[in-house]
Amino acid sequence: MNIRLGEIINKNELFEKMKIAVIEGNKHEAESLAQNAVENKLELNEVIEKGYTPGIQKAGDLWESGEY
């Protein structure tokens, strides 16, 4: 699901979408979600820690297990 610029969504929903975008390797979606976070003046450290980092960790786990 693509988030349009300026569209406000729940932070937890945003973080989950960020995680999924990273796991799926969806660069456009990850960028769109980052832009959404910036436009909505979210704390960017929190965005990285709760959105992107879990996706990176999961992708690493999948790669290590040979599923990726």
Image (cartoon, rainbow, N blue to C red):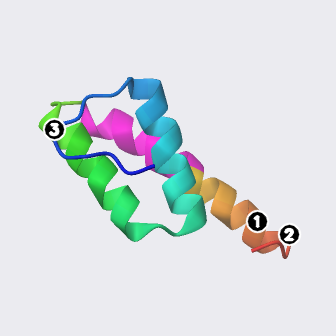
Residue 33 placement (x, y as % from top left): 32, 48
- How many numbered circles are shown? 3
- Compared across the picture, whether 46 is left or right of 65 comes to left
Q: Which residue is mark 2?
A: 65
Instruction: From the top left corner, tell me how far across and down residue 13 is, in percent.
Output: 47, 30
Tell whether position 13 is magenta.
no
Quadrant in which residue 48 is drawn: top left
Crowd band around label 1 with a 10 angstrom C-alpha radius: few (<14), some (14–19), many (20+):
few
For numbered disc 2, what is the local secondary structure? loop
User: Residue at 38% of width from left, 58% of height from top?
Assistant: 30
In-image side of 40 versus 28 (left or right) = left
Q: Residue at x 25, y 39 (%)?
A: 37
In magenta, the rendered stretch is: 43-54
Does the residue at mark 2 contact the one at mark 1 (Cβ under 8 Å)? yes
The residue at which mark 3 appears reads as 6
Q: Callout 3, which amino acid? A: Gly
